[in-house]
Image (spheres, helix red, strand yellow):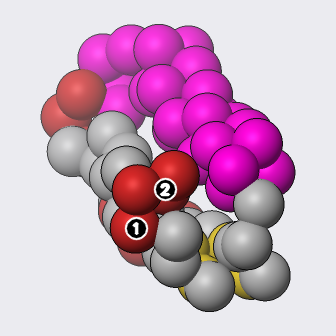
Amino acid sequence: MVERRKPPSVFPLAAQALVGTVYADPAATAEINALGTANVLLAAHAHGGVRAVVAVTSDKCYDARA
């Protein structure tokens, strides 16, 4: 998609954020979220033209109570 569209900016929004799933398998959740972000960064780098990747997260998706 990055190669075909050639966007100047990318906002990766996909992640595992279902609290029940996070608690049931936190290691898989970390892997999914980290590898997903890494794949977006690699695609942006490989196809050039992307000047910014905005990756944002929130502890609220993990039901933080602090």
**Which quadrant holds residue 60?**
bottom left
Classed neighbour count for the residue bearing mark 1: other residues with Cα under 10 Å, few (<14), some (14–19), many (≥20): few
Cα gap from disc 2 to disc 1, whole angstroms: 5 Å
In the image as oriented, which residue stretches furthest toward the front? 4
Question: Could you tell me the amino acid type at mark 1?
Answer: Arg
Q: Which residues are magenta?
A: 22-47
Where 51 falls versus 61 (above or below)?
below
5 or 15, which is in the foreground? Answer: 5
In the image, residue 64 lies at what x, y percent? 48, 64
64 in the magenta segment: no
Classed neighbour count for the residue bearing mark 2: other residues with Cα under 10 Å, few (<14), some (14–19), many (≥20): some
Residue annotated with mark 1: 5
Q: Is the residue under label 1 in contact with that under label 2 (CB below 8 Å)?
A: yes
64 or 47, which is in the foreground? Answer: 47
Residue annotated with mark 2: 2
> Residue 64, can we see it?
no
